[in-house]
Each structure stands twice: as C-alpha cells, then as structure tokens.
Image: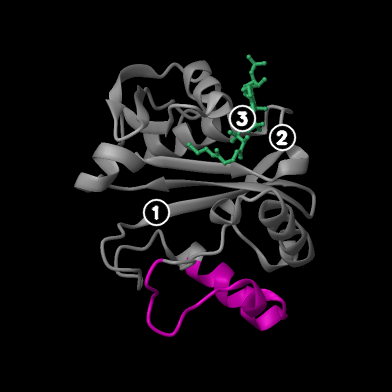
Amino acid sequence: MELVDPDVRFHRSFLSAVEEFVAAGEARYAGLPVFGWGGVPGDEFPREAIQDPAGFAALVRVVVEAKKPFAARPAGYVPWTELWMADGDEYLGRITLRHELTDALLTWGGHIGYAVRPSARRRGHASAALAGMLEVAWRRGIDPVLVTCDVDNLGSRRVIEHAGGAFEDVREGKRRYWVPSRVPTDGG
Ligand SMILES: CC(C)(COP(=O)(O)OP(=O)(O)OC[C@H]1O[C@@H](n2cnc3c(N)ncnc32)[C@H](O)[C@@H]1OP(=O)(O)O)[C@@H](O)C(=O)NCCC(=O)NCCS
C-alpha cells in the first residue's frame, strides 16, 4: 500500500469502492465530498456525478486543492490534506488530516479521519496510512494529533492505540486520543 495524492487514474477503482461502501451501508465513508455538506457552490458530487471522467476529475480537483488555505470549501470546514491508499491503480481507501481544530473537531471529529474499502480491510492498511499521515502532521507542525473513533468501533480503536494514542476521554459517543506525530523516515 502506498499513500498517494488523489488522481484521476483511480476512476474505475474509486467507483467500485463507492459501490462497496454503499452496499455495506457505509455511504458516509465513500469519499464523496459535499455528500450532505451543504455544498461548495457549483460543486456537488452525488454518485451519478462522478461516473463520467469530467465529474470525477472535478472531485479529484476539490480534494487535491483542499489543502490550500483559500480553496473553496463548505462553511465551517478548515483546510485538509487528503491522501489515498493505493496499490498500483487500485484505490484502497482514503485518509484526511484537518490542519486546524474547530470546536466541533476538538469535541468530536479530531484531526484525522480514514476509511478503507470493505474488500481491503484487516490487512493493516489503516494502520499504515495513519503512520504515514502522522509524518505529514509532523511536517505541518501538528503535534500531538487528535484522533477519535466511535465508542463501538473496535477496528479504529486498535488502529489509534497501535499508533501510540493516549486516551483522553469520551465526548458525544467518541473516544478521543492524542497521538504523537512522527518524524518523517526521510528526516523531514
Ligand atoms: C476501521 C477501519 C479503518 C480499519 O481499517 P483496516 O485497514 O481494516 O485496519 P487494520 O487492518 O490496520 O487493523 C488494525 C487493527 O484493528 C483490528 N481490526 C480491524 N478491523 C476490526 C474489526 N472490525 N473488529 C475488530 N478488530 C478490527 C485488526 O485486527 C488490527 O488489530 P491487530 O493489529 O491487533 O491484529 C475500517 O474498518 C474502516 O474503514 N471502517 C469504516 C470507516 C471507519 O470506521 N473509519 C474510522 C472512523 S474513526
């Protein structure tokens, strides 16, 4: 698994991953930005909109640009870095790092969110992706990093605890952990 920038070369694989998330009852993890967000004006990404290459390219552009401080984004959203988990041209999942904490992120959402497509789970991808994103956080001067999970999400809880997360408390059904960011393996 590699962590890579979102790219149009994943179109076919991304679409099949969306179908997997939907079939598993997990549409909210499918990686369709603006899915119920209230929308960036002019940018809506329901499943139908990304079937054609131009629609998918628009989605890729939004998530690549999201790291830029002045990019268009829904109200209340802070800039974030989004990377995709990949094996060649196969899309395996996504991980995002929010660059700042709002009150809602501090209580509930945390800095980092991730999702692995159902067919690629239990192979260590989320753990590896979190390790990689903790290096990105270090480069951005974010340390420690807040990562949260639903109290009943055992898989995510293990991912966070393996990364060295220090449990703080439970707020609004979320277990909250502070995870040390990581010095990049190339020394930064
Ligand atoms: C949670 C999720 C990200 C885990 O991804 P993954 O790639 O399967 O995780 P890993 O393979 O790195 O597993 C890490 C550990 O969790 C364990 N684990 C993974 N899924 C598990 C599950 N459903 N139940 C119990 N343990 C689980 C693994 O066995 C492993 O533990 P071990 O190293 O002690 O053996 C994935 O199930 C997912 O995308 N779920 C839906 C989205 C989601 O919940 N995102 C997190 C929001 S906070």
Query: Secondary structure beneath disc 3?
Result: helix
Q: Amino acid at mark 3?
A: Ala
Task: Please give left or right for residue 110 compared with residue 31 in the image.
Answer: left
In this rendering, the answer to whether 67 lies above or below 38 is: above
Disc marking residue 121 = 2
Q: Looking at the picture, tell me which residue is in the foreground, 12 or 89.
A: 12
Residue beneath disc 1: 80
Mark 2 beta carbon near ligand 1 (under 8 Å): yes
Q: Amino acid at mark 2?
A: Arg
* Quadrant of res 7: bottom right
Q: Looking at the picture, tell me which residue is in the foreground, 23 or 110.
A: 23
- Give percent across and percent down for residue 97: 42, 45
Tell whether position 5 is magenta.
Answer: no
Bounds of the magenta span? 37-62
Q: Badge 1, how many Cα within 10 Å: few under 14, some, many 20+?
A: many
Residue beneath disc 3: 128
Q: Amino acid at mark 1?
A: Trp
